[in-house]
Each structure stands twice: as structure tokens, then as C-alpha cells.
Amino acid sequence: MLLYNTCFKGVVPPFFRRSQNGLNMKVIDSQNYLEVLERLRKPWQEKYYAMYSSVLGGVVLDPLLMQVPADDHLVHRGDGVFDTFKCVGRAAYNLDAHLRRLMRSAEAISLAWPGGMDEIRALTLETLAKADRAECSGRVMVARGPGSFGVSPYESPAPALYILAYAAGVPFMEKHPEGARVRRSHVPVKPARFATVKNCNYLPNVMMKREAVDWGVDFVVGFDADGLMAEGATENFGIVTRSGELLFPRMETVLDGTTMLRVMKLAETLVEAGALEKIAFRDITEADACAASEMLVVGTTLNVVSVREFEGVPVGDGRPGPVGRALDKLLVCDIATNDALRTAY
């Protein structure tokens, strides 16, 4: 009270008055909850098509009902894993590869879904069918589940599963055929143990994306303490050397991107045609990146992106190169026509 008397000299500050008089806060209960929600409807929610929730035991189609319990450890600890895939022509592309990675990520943090991958796959396809969209993105999240606001994973009695169908993004090169601008990130690279797990604690990734936006570039890429290329906020990075090698960082240190792996497989046709000398996973230094004839960014939404500028300096001749352009075309064709990797819903 001495501090209060000295600072305010008898004048009651606003926060004391609010505490004494009350805020007249509205109480929301089961009777008025939906009415309150309806007033919160926003234009961007039109991009949310469907959500399965194991907590609810079904699918909701109204975005206002796409909610996760606040006491799910996914929310307050980032304790969960996820994977994202794309759908084209009412078929999920490379779905099993995404779900296998999801299961590996879950196992890495001692998390398991009782029904296993087969049940997740079936629920995912049913959610997509309920969404009833030919083109969309899908996301599957396996969470530690509700149970407490503590940090111990043992306080959640059972895991939770959330599956979302939402509007698909436009591949980067369709919007920016001139290619991308990239800078080196200042955000410390994740340790390999966490970089190789697609977990829901994405704060470093968020800060990387903020860098890109604040700096006015399209992407940033991380380099580890040894100066070796890592990955972007949500993307894998690679280079084409002047001797014709397509290189991506060793997978022991980065997330094993499903698009990256598929691109490397498709690149075998370029090796056979003589457009590439070889393909490999190996350490890539910043000097390697600066000397490359092409730099590539790959991701589920992006497809294959050609980088025209790295750290303010043109990559190659400053235009999308032949390898990047060819791989992007091969991937687009693969997504649309490869029946072995397309799962209809």
C-alpha cells in the first residue's frame, strides 16, 4: 500500500476500480453458445470445408464448430504430430507416404493412435468425402489429447485425432513464374532429433516465416552451426551444381519431405536423359549454394520452386533453370495422373 499511496496519491487507478466494481462479463453457456458463435463468423472460414474430431466422434462441416479442447496438450504444449497432403481431382496424392511419416513422427514422441494407420486412413478419406471438394488440402493431427493443463504427457488419458479438409494453396510458380527470392535465416536450426519429427511445436518455423515476410522475400533457409544447409519454414531446399548434380541435405538432419523424395525419384528420368549427372543427399555449404547453377525449394503446396536470387545475388543467370522447370512439370503430371499414388475419395 505504500507503493500505491506514493505512486497514485489517493487516486484509484483503473485496474483497481475494475477489480472492485466488476467487468459485467457475459456468461456464455449451452443456451446462448451457438448464438455467440454465429456472430463470430468470418470470411476466411469459407476456406474450411470439414473437420473430423475424435473428441466429438464425427465430422463437422460448419467452420464455427471446428474447435479443439483448450486442455488438449496439442494446444498448450504443442504435444502432437501432423502431416499435410494435397488433393487433386477428388484424389489424395501420395497419401500413404504422408501417413507413414505421421506414424513415424508419432512413434518418435511415444504417441500412438489405437486404430493405427489403417483407421486414420479410412477416417481421412471419409472426411474428404464429406468435404466434397475436388481440390483441397488435407491435414491429419494426432494429439496427446485432453486431460490437464500440465506438462506431463501421462496426464492425458487417451490421444485425440483431428482431420481437416481446407482450401488448397496455389503452387508458387503459377503465381510467380519469375522465381523466388531467398535469404539466410537467423533462426537457430532445430536439433536433428526434432527436425526429423513433424511435430506441432512450430515456433521456429513461425519465426522463419516472419523473417521472410519482414524482409520482403519469398522464403528463408536455415544453416546449422557447421554452416550446412538445413530447411525452410515449411520447405525442403536443394541445389543443382554447375557439374549437373541435384543435391538435397542429408535426411539425418532435415525432415524427410514427401515432395522432396518424390522429386528425387522423378529426377532419375533426367539422369537417364542426360539432363542431370547424378542425384544425391549430402552436406551442402553456403558456398555450395552461392556457386550453384540452380537452387530449388520443394513442398506439398509449392511443388517445385526455382530460386532466382539468394542473399541478394542472382542464382545462375537469375531466371528459373532447366532442371527446376523440368522437375516442376514432372511433379505436376505425377500428381494428376499417377494412379499408383492417387487415392480416390
Image: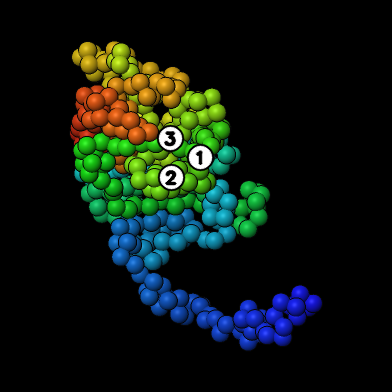
Q: Measured from the top left, where is residue 115 in percent x and y? A: 48, 44
**Between discs 1 and 2, the one toward the N terminus:** 1
Instruction: Answer left or right for 142 relative to 219.
Output: right
To which quarter of the image does residue 37 belong?
bottom left
Q: Measured from the top left, where is residue 103 in percent x and y? A: 48, 37
Q: Determine the CA span between mark 1 and mark 2.
A: 9 Å
Q: What residue type is labelled 1?
A: Val
How many labels, in total? 3
Q: Mark 2 points at which residue?
A: 211
Q: Determine the CA span between mark 3 and mark 2.
A: 10 Å
Q: What residue type is labelled 2?
A: Glu
Residue at left offset 67%, top offset 84%? 12
Q: Determine the CA span between mark 3 and mark 1.
A: 9 Å
Q: Measured from the top left, where is residue 91 in percent x and y? A: 26, 42
To which quarter of the image does residue 264 belong?
top left
Q: What residue type is labelled 3?
A: Arg
On residue 187, the disc is 1
Residue at left offset 40%, top offset 20%? 288
**Element under disc 1:** loop
**Foreground of the two, 265 or 184:** 184
Q: Can residue 169 be seen in this view?
A: yes
Q: Mark 3 points at which residue?
A: 184
Other-residue count near label 3 (Cα within 10 Å), few / some / many at <14 / 14–19 / ≥20: some
Residue at left offset 34%, top offset 34%? 312
Q: Is residue 77 above or below residue 262?
A: below
Q: Measured from the top left, where is residue 64 in percent x and y? A: 39, 66
**Between discs 3 and 2, the one toward the N terminus:** 3
- Residues at badges 1 and 2 in contact (C-beta under 8 Å)? yes
Instruction: Answer left or right for 224 relative to 121.
Output: right
